[in-house]
Image (cartoon, rainbow, N blue to C red):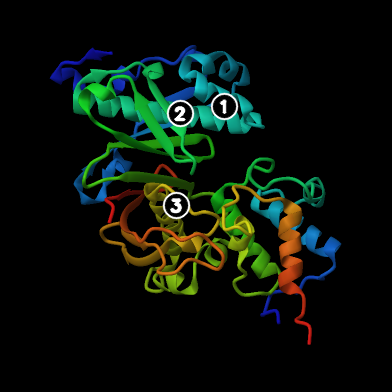
Amino acid sequence: MTEASPGEALRAPRHFGPLPGGGVAGIVRRPWRQAAYLPGRVPGWCCQCVEAEADEAWDEAAAPYILHEPEWRIWNRLPRAALRRQWLRGRVAAKDAVRWLLLERFRLVAPLEAVSILPDEHGQPRVSCSALPDTGASLCVSISHCGNTSVALATERSAFCRGVGIDVASQTDNHDGLAEGGFSSVETSLLDDCPAPERSAWLLRLWCAKEAAGKALGVGLQGNPLNFVVCQINRARQTVEVETPAAPADGAPPLPAAQMTAHVGCDRGLAFAVASWKGN
Amino acid sequence: MAGPGQRTVGNSQDALLNEVRGAIAQVRGCDAGNAAEAIRPDAFLGADLGLSSIAVARLAGILQQRCGRGPLPFHTLFVNPDRTLRQDIRVAEVAAFLERHLRPPTP
C-alpha cells in the first residue's frame, strides 16, 4: 500500500492496473460516474466490469490472483460457470470502486488483492482492507449484475450513510409480467401521468430503486418486492422515494422502518438506481 | 374468473407444473416447448436456472396473468414456517403453491 500524490488522484482509473492476463481476457473495466451520484450529497465511487467475451480458462487461472482465499473458496463452490464468471466480474468492479475511493479519499494506492469483499449473513458485501484500520474509516459497497455487465458502488460509512445500494437492469430485455409481479396497483398508478412511450423505462427504474433500497438497508427484497414500496416519483429530478411498509407481509420477519431516496437513470441501455440509507 | 385475453389453467398437478415450466421458459426467453420440458421439477429457480430477482418477479406476474388471477402471495414461498427466509425455491414448490391457491374453496 503506497500513498499517491494529489495529482495522481485525478487519474484514478489508471491505478486500476491490469488484471492477470487482462489483455486477452476480453474484460473492460471503467469508472461509471453517472451512477456515482448519491442523493443527499453522499460521495460515491462507481465502476463497471464488462465481459466482452467469455473465457473460462482465464477465470480459472486469474481467480486466485484477484480473490482472497475466502473469496476464492466461495467462488469455487458456485455451481455454474456463468455464475462464477458473474461473481468474479462483480468482485473486480467492487474492488476497483473501493480502490478508486481509497485513492481519491485517502490517497492510498491499493492493489487488487489488498481489498477483500465477503458476504455477511444477509448476502450483503462487506469490505475489508489492510489499510483501513490506520484511517479509522469503514467502507460500504454494493454490487449488481446485468447480462455481461457487473457494476459496483462504494462509499465511506458515516453519520449520513450507513449503507449503499445499486441495481441495474437491461432496457432492451423483455419485462413482461414485471408490473404485475413486482408492484402493487397503487405503485403502478404513480406512472399514470407518464407518457406511454416512457412508461416501461420508468417501470424498470422503479424496480431498480426497490432493489437499491433493499441493498442499502442490508436485507434485500427477501423474495417480496412489496417489502419496499415506491411512494413518490420525481421524473424531472430522476428520483424515486421508497419506504418499507408499516406492517410486514403475512408470516414474514419485520423490516426496520426506512425511507430512502433513490437516484435513477439510464446509460448505454442500462436502467440504474442508487440509494443510500442514513439510518433512523 | 379469467379476464379478457386470459385463460384459466387446469388445476391438476401435471398441468400446473407444465404451466410453471412454460412461464419459466418465457422469462428465460426460450419459449419453445422442449425448453420448458427440460426444466426439472427439483431445479432451484436461482442456483440451477439462473433466475435473478427481477426474473422471479416477472415469473410471478406471468403466472398471475396465465392463471387469470389477481395478486397471489408468492412471497410466502420465501418464508419458512419459523419466519426465517429462504434464498431459493424449487420449480415444484411454485406448482404446489399454485395448486393450493387455485383450488376452489371447500364449501
- Mark 3, Cα crowd under 10 Å, few <14 / some 14-19 / many 20+, is many
Q: Is residue A237 above or below residue B4?
A: above
Q: Tell me the residue that label 1 is attached to.
A: A75
User: Residue type at mark 1?
Assistant: Trp
Where is residue A3? Give x, y as percent.
Answer: 20, 14
Which mark sits nearer the N-terminus, 1 or 2? 1
Where is residue B31? Give x, y as percent.
Answer: 73, 52
Q: Chain of mark 3?
A: A
Q: Is residue B3 above or below residue A96?
A: below
- Mark 2, Cα crowd under 10 Å, few <14 / some 14-19 / many 20+, is many
For label 3, the SS is helix
For label 1, the SS is helix
User: Residue type at mark 3?
Assistant: Glu
Q: Is residue B35 above or below residue A32?
A: below
Which mark sits nearer the N-terminus, 1 or 3? 1
Query: Splitting the image into 4 quarters, where does residue A181 fall?
Result: bottom right
Where is residue A43? Give x, y as percent.
Answer: 23, 40
Which mark sits nearer the N-terminus, 3 or 2? 2
Query: Splitting the image into 4 quarters, where does residue B103 fall?
Result: bottom right
Assess whether mark 2 and mark 1 are in contact (beta carbons under 8 angstroms): yes
Residue at (41%, 74%) from the top-left corner?
A: A192
Q: Tell me the residue that label 2 is attached to.
A: A91
The span from disc 3 to disc 2 (Cα, nearest Å) is 19 Å
- State left or right for residue A43 relative to residue B26: left
The span from disc 1 to disc 2 (Cα, nearest Å) is 10 Å
Q: Tell me the residue that label 3 is attached to.
A: A211
Same-chain status of marks 3 and 2:
yes
Q: Is residue A10 visible?
A: no
Residue at (40%, 55%) from the top-left corner?
A: A209
Q: Is residue A31 visible?
A: yes
